[in-house]
Structure formats: C-alpha cells, structure tokens
Image (cartoon, helix red, strand yellow):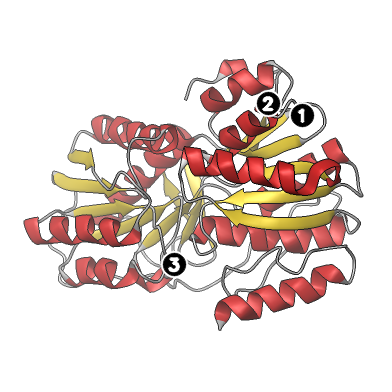
Amino acid sequence: MKRMTLGVLLGLGLMSGTALAASAWTGGDDQATNPLACDGTAAAAASMPYDGGQPTGAPDRNGKKITVVDVPKLIGIGYFNATSKGIADAAKELGNVDAKTDGPTKANIDEQITFLDNYITSGVDGILFAANDPVAIAPVLKKALSKGINVVGYDANSTPDARQWFVNQAQFNGIAKALVDNMAKEIGEDGAFAIVTSTFTTPNQARWIAEMAAYQEKCHPKMKWLETVEAQEDNNLSFNQATTLINKYGDQLKGIFGMTSVATPASAEAVTQANMCGKIAVVGLATPNAMKPYVEKDCVKSVVLWNPVDLGYAAMYVLRAAADGTLKPGATSVKAGKLGELQVINGSEILLGAPYTFTKENIGQFDF
C-alpha cells in the first residue's frame, strides 16, 4: 500500500506540471518530501527529538578496545571499498578499535541479514551497516541492540529504532537538488529523462528519487520524466537497462540519471556505445575513478557524490563515540577526527556535509 500511495501521489502531483509517464515511479515510502528552494537558499535545520534505538545492558566500553564489523550492502565494488578504507583509517587513528568489513557479494537483503546474524552470534561490540532494505533489516539490528551491541548505519538507513545513529552522506533533498539542477543545465527546462536505479525499495535511492520528483515539480516543472527502471547493483543489467531506454525512447530521451555508483558509469558506457555522447546527458552518483574516462572524453559533464572514504571514516568515529557514551540522545554534534564536528539532524542522523559535483576541471584531483 505504501508503494502505491507514493506512486499515485507523485504521479498526480507531477502530471499536473509535466508530461510524466504514469510508470515513472512506483516505489519508495510514504514519507513527506521537503524540496529545497529553487534559488539555493539554505534550508533551516529541523529540530527533532532523538528517535534512534538503544543497546540493552551494554557493558562499559569507554576507552576500551572494541571489535567492530562493517556489513555494507555488498562488498567488492569501488564505492564500498572506499567506505571500508575510511572505516579502517579511522580505526587505526583511534587505536582502540579492531574493525573489519564483510558482507554479501550481491546487494541481497537476505544474505546481508545472514551475515549480520552470524556476527551477532559470534560476538562483536559494534556493527556498522548500509541497508539493502530499511524494514527487512530492522529485526536483526534490533536483535543486535538487545544483545548490548552498538549499532550505527551509514549510506542507507534502517528504520530509526533499529540503530542508534545514522551517518547521512548528504541530506536527501540536497542530493536531489544537485542532480536535477545539473540535468536541467544540460538538457534544458523541457528535456525528457529516465532513471536507472538499484531497486524501488532501496532506502537511500528511494528517498533521493522522491525528493527529485518534488524538487523537479517545484523548480523545473516542464522537464519530462519518462521512466524509472531497476538494475540492482549489477553492471551488466545497468548497461542493458540504459541501452533499452536509449532504444525505446529514441530522440525523445535527452538524459539518464544513474542512482548508484554502478548504474552511472554503466549508463555512460551505454551512451558511449550508442554513439550518443553529446546527445544524451548522463548525470548521477558515482565515484570519480569510475567516471574519469567519460568525463575526460566530454561524454559526461557532471558527477554528484560525496567522499565515501570520509563517510566510512565518520561512521567509525560515530560508533566509537556511541560506545564510549560521549554521543548520547539529545546531542547536537559529534567530533569526528580530521572532519571536525559533524552536526546532528533529524533527531538521530549525523550529516557528513553537502554533496559535491565532480567536473572535468576537478575530477582529476580525486582518487577513489
């Protein structure tokens, strides 16, 4: 019912101002959207009570060595290799953390739950996670809390009561604004676009797309949203889905959004192989290293992201602070090593910072 509710609401709202196809978006959740101002005026930080969970009967871990496992959506891709590096860097810097990354090789929630359950059984002091599904992962995370384990999410959230804190790489509406503004700059105010995402229920992508819909309706109402397709976190499927969109819509398609670090370079490769560079814009979320070949050839003008090494680094510092008891419900900020003080937002989220746009002028300065 939640999927249908959001799909209907977004469809009705967007079709009033655009030529949106009825099938443009069918997933997500029923959370309200909060589009930023069209002129870039900063949004006021919302003051909300703490809504996270708490470990039951946790021992005194203040300053003591702890063992931490990081279980991302999947292992073996550049993005989570980068977050894992950040976690390892922070653990080494802290000196009292033994951290490791482990998880499924595909973005499969059932496999992710199995990994988490096994580490709860074997015994760890802390868990870091990036959820494949916010609701499905909640019971196993609550189990961890019930065993006194500190639990912190990053990149993709769970339901708030299933973890203590969530480190948000950038606010959803900020990512949405950066993506849509960059696309509008490339394809014009009346251009038509499609989206390649992982799944309709992957929490961060679902929220980004919902916020993109709201922001596009408000600030770029003549843009046309053709379709959203799922491609898991699979390179071949992402390439095939992008190719299908190119063939299906022909000259009508002016832009493709890639919502994952896999979908964006795969979409750029599909545009390249279709000899459509300069005719179909690709704007999306991806690591600089994956996009450098396409940016340097002017097939891609802009890539939106944050530094995933910093994201993992921040998550490790947040978990350490939670374990030490120095980060408590009601806190307004937390110290995160070289990143300085990070702000607490929305009750139990910690904000890494604003999104960053990589272009031909700056992408060579980054290596991840």
The residue positioned 85% from the left and 39% from the top of the image is 187
- In the rendered structure, find residue 276 and report the number of the disc placed on it: 1
Outermost residue toward the bottom? 1
Measured as percent of width and height from the top left, residue 216 is found at: 80, 57
Task: Answer with left or right where residue 192 lies relative to residue 329.
Answer: right
Q: Are marks 1 and 2 in contact (CB under 8 Å)?
A: yes
Residue nearest the viewer, comparing 352 with 139: 139
Q: CA distance from mark 1 to mark 2?
A: 6 Å
**Label 2: how many residues lie within 10 Å, few (<14), some (14-19) or many (20+)?**
some
Q: State the residue position of label 2.
A: 272
- Mark 1 or 3: in front is 1
Q: CA distance from mark 2 to mark 3?
A: 50 Å
User: Which residue is farthest left?
Assistant: 122
Callout 1 secondary element: loop
Vertically, is 256 above or below 28?
A: above
Q: Identify the amino acid type marked 3.
A: Gly
* Horizontal and vertical percent position of residue 136: 36, 70
Q: Amino acid at mark 1?
A: Met
Instruction: Examine the image and state in which quarter residue 89 appears.
Output: top left
Residue type at mark 2 is Thr
**Above-or-below relation of 234 to 56:** above
One can see residue 61 in this view: yes
Between disc 1 and disc 3, whose residue precedes? 1
Toward the viewer: 113 or 96?
113
* Residue ranking furthest to the front: 247
Looking at the rendered image, the quarter that the N terminus falls into is bottom right
Give the CA distance from mark 1 to mark 3.
Answer: 51 Å
Q: Position of residue 364 (x, y in %)?
A: 60, 15
Horizontal side of residue 251 vs 286, given as left or right: right
Any mark on residue 330, and which?
3
